[in-house]
Image (cartoon, helix red, strand yellow):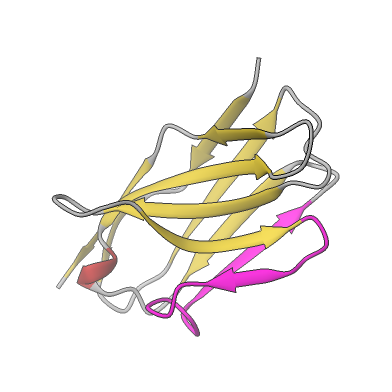
Amino acid sequence: QVQLVESGGGLVQAGGSLRLSCAASGDNFSGSIMGWYRQAPGKQREMVATVTSGGITDYADSVTGRFTISRHNAKNTVDLQMDSLKPEDTAVYFCRVRRVWSPRYDYWGQGAQVTVSS
C-alpha cells in the first residue's frame, strides 16, 4: 500500500520560513517525479515545485528564488524549504509522486496546512 506522509506545516509570520517533508513508501519510486502542489481556498490546485529522480527541478514563477525543493532518492523523500514567506503562500500543500512511463502511477499525500500571517 502506497503512503505519502507529509510533515512540517504550520503558522508563520510573513518573512519567515517553513520546511515541508514528504516520505513515500510502498512502491518503486525510481524514475518518478516528486513534487509539491498547493491549493488555497477558492482556488485551483497549482504546481509549486517538482524534481525528477535525476535532480532536474521546476518551480512556479511565484516561488522562484524563495522556495527550494530537494529529493533524497535512497530514502524516497522530498522536502520543500520555504523562505521569505508571504501571506499569499497560505494554502494546503500536497506532496505528489508520479511516473509518466510504464508502469504509470500518480499518488498524492493528504495535505499539510501552511498559514502565513501578515
Residue 4: quarter of image:
top right
Residue plotted at (51% across, 35% down): 108
**Split into 4 quadrants, where in the image is the N terminus?**
top right
- 14 with respect to 84 (left or right): left
For this view, does 75 lie left or right of residue 82? right
The percent position of residue 56, horizontal first and vertical second, equals 73, 69
As drawn, 15 above or below 45? below
As drawn, 82 above or below 19: below
Is 25 situated above or below 18?
above
Outermost residue on the top side: it is 1
As drawn, the residue found furthest toward the front would be 102
Q: Which of 94 and 112 is in front in this view?
A: 94
- Dividing the picture into quadrants, the one containing residue 58 is bottom right
Compared across the picture, whether 115 is left or right of 81 comes to left
Q: How many marks?
A: 0
Q: In this view, which residue lies farthest toward the bottom? A: 65
- Which quadrant would the C terminus be assigned to in this image? bottom left
Question: Which residue is at a point 20% across and 54% down the rendered structure image?
Answer: 43
Q: Residue at x 25, y 60 (%)?
A: 90
Counting from the top left corner in percent of width and height, residue 27 is at: 76, 26
Residue 47 is covered by the magenta coloring:
no
Where is residue 116 drawn, in percent x and y? 24, 64
Tell me which segment is drawn in magenta: 53-72
Q: In this view, does 100 lie above or below 49?
A: above
Residue at the spot 83% in from the left edge and 42% down from the top edge: 30
Q: Indicate the position of residue 55 as horizontal and vertical percent values.
A: 78, 66
